[in-house]
């Protein structure tokens, strides 16, 4: 009997018999950012469960080492040093937000430890010469590019660019202005408005005088809603209106049927036919009883990229893993992955969604479209939805 028990104790799977592969991250589990970041944490836990159920990585189970950043962005470097030196994690996934990721990236680079950047979309995160930090999220600059490509596809030339007065919106708009010239589009200076702006009369007057055909506005749902209210009051309608915040469900709640024909810029869509997205969304909903949002998709995509790189490298030895991530070209539920020498993402793009009959339809890129884009109808031509 004793021999049988001993045999049973040693008859473990290879994934349990070997030392675990540890993946470390510092996320806000408490503090003002905790609610925003909870989907990111849930996606990583889902991935860990899935990969271990499939036998682990390289025959070893995967363990997450998650530290609470307490929503303190400036603590990010200290926490990532702790993950490397005290917890001795094999690989890192970046923290929540560009500010925290910038600090964590510097630590990873200094320690020559691979870090997958899941949410740091700002261009400052990937400095020239970085070799160990790899971005999976679509960079901020790509948000304007997506909108401009739709402008060009619609045969439009003259563009108005607006930005909420915050670093993220201003970076998106500035990059869009740079790209407009390369696409042969006419775009003047970026019009920056305060975060609490409710009047856009002067911007509309300038757009009318310039014969602007398209508006691209970077900001939140409330900004997009206030612009639409001004459009209606002034009986003004450009041929195309793209507002980043219109992808937020709160936009429709704010303006109701006046949301029709507005195009939003979306980091992730539950309905997108990207690789593995249907399975991811189904598994996430089953485990957490909620639909996945953009942060959930970003966390899961970063983990899947890491998983694929480890499999291809056949090891978690840092130099070989770094080479695998640099050469990897693949696709996740978030979209394509490919990086340049600095590790910055060059393939991922946000999607454009248009409000059509009260529903968000993907209209760009064409490969993922669920509907064709429609013109931004004049106010006199609109009919109440039934």
Image: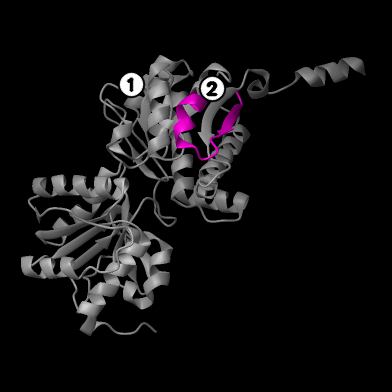
Q: Is residue 293 left or right of residue 344?
A: right
Which of pointers 1 and 2 indicates the residue nearer the eye? 2
| Residue 139, percent from left and from top | 31, 41
User: How many numbered discs sit on the rendered protein?
Assistant: 2
Residue 239 position, x and y percent, is 17, 69
Image quarter hosting the N terminus: top right
Residue 72 magenta: yes
How dense is the environment of label 2, judged by Cα within 10 Å: few (below 14), some, or many (20 and up)? some
Work out whether residue 304 can be spotted.
Answer: no
For the residue pair 161 and 246, the one nearer the viewer reads as: 161
Residue 296 appears left or right of 199: right
Q: Mark 1, residues whose alpha carbon is within 10 Å: few (<14), some, or many (≥20)?
A: many
Work out whether 61 lies above or below 28.
Answer: above
Check disc 2 and report the residue beneath it. 82
Which residue is rendered at x = 35% and y = 29% of the image? Answer: 328
Question: Is residue 352 one of those drawn in magenta?
Answer: no
Residue 294 image position (x, y, % from top left): 43, 50
Disc number for residue 131 = 1
């Amino acid at each position: 009997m004793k021999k049988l028990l001993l045999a049973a104790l040693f008859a473990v799977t290879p994934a349990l018999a070997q030392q675990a592969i540890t993946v470390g991250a510092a996320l806000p589990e408490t503090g003002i950012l905790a609610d925003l970041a909870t989907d990111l944490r849930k996606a990583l836990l889902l991935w860990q469960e899935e990969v271990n159920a499939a036998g682990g990585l390289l025959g070893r189970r995967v363990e997450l080492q998650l530290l609470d950043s307490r929503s303190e962005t400036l603590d990010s470097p200290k926490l990532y040093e702790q993950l490397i030196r005290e917890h001795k994690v094999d690989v890192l996934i970046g923290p929540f937000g560009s500010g925290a990721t910038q600090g964590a990236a510097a630590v990873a680079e200094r320690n020559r430890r691979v870090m997958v950047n899941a949410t740091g979309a700002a261009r400052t995160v990937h400095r020239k010469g970085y070799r160990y930090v790899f971005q999976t999220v679509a960079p901020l600059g790509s948000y304007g590019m997506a909108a401009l490509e739709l402008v060009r596809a619609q045969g439009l030339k003259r563009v108005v660019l607006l930005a909420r007065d915050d670093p993220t919106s201003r970076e998106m708009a500035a990059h869009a202005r740079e790209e407009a010239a390369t696409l042969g589009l006419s775009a003047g200076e970026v019009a920056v408005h305060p975060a609490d702006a409710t009047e856009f009369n002067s911007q509309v007057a300038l757009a009318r005088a310039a014969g602007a055909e398209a508006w691209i506005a970077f900001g939140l749902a409330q900004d997009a809603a206030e612009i639409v209210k001004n459009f209606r009051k002034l009986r003004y309608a450009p041929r195309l209106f793209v507002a980043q915040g219109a992808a937020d469900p709160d936009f429709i709640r704010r303006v109701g049927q006046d949301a029709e024909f507005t195009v939003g810029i979306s980091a992730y869509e539950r309905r997108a036919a990207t690789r593995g997205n249907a399975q991811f969304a189904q598994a996430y909903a089953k485990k957490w009883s909620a639909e996945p949002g953009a942060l959930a998709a970003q966390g899961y995509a970063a983990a899947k990229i890491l998983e694929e790189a480890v499999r291809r490298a056949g090891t978690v030895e840092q130099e070989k893993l770094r080479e695998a991530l640099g050469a990897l070209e693949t696709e996740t539920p978030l979209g394509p992955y490919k990086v340049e020498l600095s590790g910055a993402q060059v393939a991922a793009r946000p999607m454009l969604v248009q409000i059509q009959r009260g529903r968000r339809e993907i209209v760009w890129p064409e490969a993922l479209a669920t509907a064709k884009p429609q013109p931004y109808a004049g106010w006199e031509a609109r009919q109440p939805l039934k």
